[in-house]
Each structure stands twice: as structure tokens, then as C-alpha cells.
């Protein structure tokens, strides 16, 4: 009997070791696959003869991290044509209003290029988010030939708008162009690390992998997007996103159904985010998973599933190996877990993120280990977002009650 047990134990150890090695090989393949997607180059767009005038509508609620710097960056554009920027708030009581007005006044006094205004949209009706309300009011006030929208927690570079318009005008079937997002700030907290990994190591590479030769995707990431006026009119304007929380993806789907392409440029848009608490990150993680489930096609999101399964397989192998005393197998399983964290950190940096300290890098794979708990929390179809409370009924989101302003990143 002892010899039989010994053989059995040896067999289990061997299988655990083989499983750990296979997991390492699979993770290496997954990493290389997404790293190659990040390195892909979209066919460059041609320079238009004339750059049309553009109105950029920037919905704002509350004070985001470094909000004043974001407002200034939105006005510091090198776009060759005329630019109008509208900062749209619910009402004059918003804490961001005096900051935006100060920046706009300074811009005017300095005689810089481009017009800028602060606009009050009023509180949205129950079936409409504040952002969609701001987009509708801003689009109605716009004087530019092209209409764009930009998130308040983003910081565009001076040449970003030029790249967006160039990509939009490359072909008449392109209805909208948009920019990929990157979290470039050095992380200060564990919440910062989690947020940066979600954007730069998971979401960004998956989207890059799905683009076609000219950057086409079946949806829009709306942190910075520009529309042809006829394309926006064909779908009923921003109001077609009434009842939607994930308005940008819905707008993209409507454009595709109307026969227009939606293309992503290569130049990234920086999302400003730092000092995120762990609790705020977990709420954001849950919100993103809810949005992704309702707004992203499976062909975009499925690469995250093998990574999540690998994380849990690695944890199971490690626990089992320790339980049966299989030292080498436990070492390999632990190495696989660390390798996944390092892989995510490397993808994050390759995508444009700041280096992650080693104390967080080795456990970066925890973003997948906590995913099941986040999935369970999604059974409650309620979301707190920028000071408002929403109840999700599939994609319809009636506003239930008003709360104080918030500077959560989107």
C-alpha cells in the first residue's frame, strides 16, 4: 500500500507540474498576442484640402482630478480650422462652473485661437443621463460644420483634434472617428494600479486587436469623438442615446446600422486619474463590467476570459500542489501567477502607462482573481455614476434620485 500511495503522489505531482508549465506557455502566448496587437499600425489618413470648422462639446459634472488643467488642454489646440469649445454643465451650482469660466475668460483675454463658452443645460429628464442631456444641448448650440464630444476627465494633446478630423474625412462612409484612451499618470495607490491595468493592459489591447486596417470598429469609445453632421443627423442626433447609459457605444451601433463606419485613430487620449481609493476602483470595475456586458460585442471581450481562467487555474494548482506537498509544482504555479501580473504590467507600459512599482506588479493578476466577486455583485442592476443613481433594465436606465456631485473617472 505505501508504494501505491507513493506512486499516486508522484503522479499527482507530475500532473500538477505539467499543468503549471502549460499555464506558463499559455500566458506567454496570450501576452505576445496582445503585445502584437498594441504594435499594429493603422493605415495613415491623408491630409484634407480644407479643415472644416469644429464644435467640441465637453459635458462636465463636478470637479475631476486636475480639472482646471483638463479645461486648459481642451482649449490649447493646433487644429488648422476654426474651433468652438462648449463646456456644458447642469446648472450654475456645479463646482466646476467657476473654474471653467475662469479658464474661458483667460483664454479670451489672451486672444488665443478658438472660441469657448460655458453652457448650462438644465437637469435631465428621468429617462436621460446628464451626459446625453449635455450632448443634446451642446449640439443644438454648435456652430461648427463638424460636431465632436469630449469627456471632462480627459486631457487632449494639441494635435488630437486634427488627427480625429483627418481620419473622419478619409472616406465618405466614415461617420465618426474617436481616440483610444490611455492612463499615463504614475500610480499613487492600489486603486490607481487597478484602474490603469483595466484600461491599458486589458481593455486597450483587446480593442486594438479587433480593429481593421483603417481602424474600424463596430462601436465608439466616446472620450473624444467627432461626427460628420449628415451621419449624426441620420441617427437622430445625440438624442438617439436617450435611455442609454453607455451612450457612445450606442451611437456607434446606430451609425453602423445606418451604413456609416466608425474608426479609431492611433493617437491616444490621456485620461487623468490618480489617488483612486480601493473602494472607488471596485465600484468602477463593476461599472465597467456592466457597461462591457451590455455594450461590447463578444469578439472584443472574449480575450479577457482565457486570462481570467488562467488566474484561477494558477491559484487552484498552487493550493493543490501545496496540499499534496508537490514543491516543484507549487513553485511553477506560483511563477505562473507572478508571470501573469508581470505580463499585465508590461502590456500596460507598452500601451503608454507609467511604470508600476514591483510591490504591485507581482500581484497585478489579482484584477482577474477578483472578477468573479465583481460578477456576482452585478446581480444588483444599480449603478452610482457621477452623483446620480441609475437602475439598469437591460440598456434602459431611468434616473431614480439625485445625489451630490462626484469626480469619479469614467
Image (tube, rainbow, N blue to C red):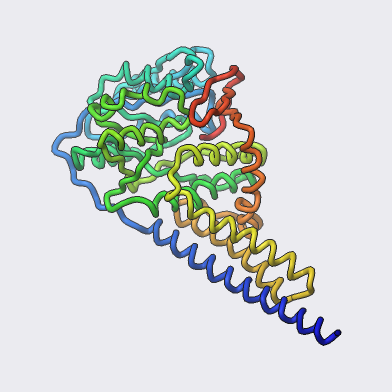
User: Which residue is more in the foreground, 154 or 216?
Assistant: 216
Q: Is residue 226 left or right of residue 5?
A: left
Q: Is residue 139 left or right of residue 378?
A: left
Q: Is residue 82 visible?
A: no
Q: Quadrant of residue 151?
A: top left
Residue furthest right in the image: 1
**Quarter of the rendering occupied by the N terminus:** bottom right
Q: Residue at x 59, y 44 (%)?
A: 192
Q: Position of residue 41 (x, y in %)?
A: 31, 56
Q: Quadrant of residue 104?
A: top left
Q: Residue at x 56, y 44 (%)?
A: 195
User: Which residue is more in the foreground, 279 or 64?
Assistant: 279
Q: Is residue 147 left or right of residue 130?
A: left
Q: Position of residue 264 (x, y in %)?
A: 33, 44
Q: Is residue 10 visible?
A: yes
User: Which residue is more in the foreground, 111 or 268?
Assistant: 268
Q: Residue at x 24, y 27 (%)?
A: 229
Q: Position of residue 266 (x, y in %)?
A: 34, 48
Amino acid at each position: 500500500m505505501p508504494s501505491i500511495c507513493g506512486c499516486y503522489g508522484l503522479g499527482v505531482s507530475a500532473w500538477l507540474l505539467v499543468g503549471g508549465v502549460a499555464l506558463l506557455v499559455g500566458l506567454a502566448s496570450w501576452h505576445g498576442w496582445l503585445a502584437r496587437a498594441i504594435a499594429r499600425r493603422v493605415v495613415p489618413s491623408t491630409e484634407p484640402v480644407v479643415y472644416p470648422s469644429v464644435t467640441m462639446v465637453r459635458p462636465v459634472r463636478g470637479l475631476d482630478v486636475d480639472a482646471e488643467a483638463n479645461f486648459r488642454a481642451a482649449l490649447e489646440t493646433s487644429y488648422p480650422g476654426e474651433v468652438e469649445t462648449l463646456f456644458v454643465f447642469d446648472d450654475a451650482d456645479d463646482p466646476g462652473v467657476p473654474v471653467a469660466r475662469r479658464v474661458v475668460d483667460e483664454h479670451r483675454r489672451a486672444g488665443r485661437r478658438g472660441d469657448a463658452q460655458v453652457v448650462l443645460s438644465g437637469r435631465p429628464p428621468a429617462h436621460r443621463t446628464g451626459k446625453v442631456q449635455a450632448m443634446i444641448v451642446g449640439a443644438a448650440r454648435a456652430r461648427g460644420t463638424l460636431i465632436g464630444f469630449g469627456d471632462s476627465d480627459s486631457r487632449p494633446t494639441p494635435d488630437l483634434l486634427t488627427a480625429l478630423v483627418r481620419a473622419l474625412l478619409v472616406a465618405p462612409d466614415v461617420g465618426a472617428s474617436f481616440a483610444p484612451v490611455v492612463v499615463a499618470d504614475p500610480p499613487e495607490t492600489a486603486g490607481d494600479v487597478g484602474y490603469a491595468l483595466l484600461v491599458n493592459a486589458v481593455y486597450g489591447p483587446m480593442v486594438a486587436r479587433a480593429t481593421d486596417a483603417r481602424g474600424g470598429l463596430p462601436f465608439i469609445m466616446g472620450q473624444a469623438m467627432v461626427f460628420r453632421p449628415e451621419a449624426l443627423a441620420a441617427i437622430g442626433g445625440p438624442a438617439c442615446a436617450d435611455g442609454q447609459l453607455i451612450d457612445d457605444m450606442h451611437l456607434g451601433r446606430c451609425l453602423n446600422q445606418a451604413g456609416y463606419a466608425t474608426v479609431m485613430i492611433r493617437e491616444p487620449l490621456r485620461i487623468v486619474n490618480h489617488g483612486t481609493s480601493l473602494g472607488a476602483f471596485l465600484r468602477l470595475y463593476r461599472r465597467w463590467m456592466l457597461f462591457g456586458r451590455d455594450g461590447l460585442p463578444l469578439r472584443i471581450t472574449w480575450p479577457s476570459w482565457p486570462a481570467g481562467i488562467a488566474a484561477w487555474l494558477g491559484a487552484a494548482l498552487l493550493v493543490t500542489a501545496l496540499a499534496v506537498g508537490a514543491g516543484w509544482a507549487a513553485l511553477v504555479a506560483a511563477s505562473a501567477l507572478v508571470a501573469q501580473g508581470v505580463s499585465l504590467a508590461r502590456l500596460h507600459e507598452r500601451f503608454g502607462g507609467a511604470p508600476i512599482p514591483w510591490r504591485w506588479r507581482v500581484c497585478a493578476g489579482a484584477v482577474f482573481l477578483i472578477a468573479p466577486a465583481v460578477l456576482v455583485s452585478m446581480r444588483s442592476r444599480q449603478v452610482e455614476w457621477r452623483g446620480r443613481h441609475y437602475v439598469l433594465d437591460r440598456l434602459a436606465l431611468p434616473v431614480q434620485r439625485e445625489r451630490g456631485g462626484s469626480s469619479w473617472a469614467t
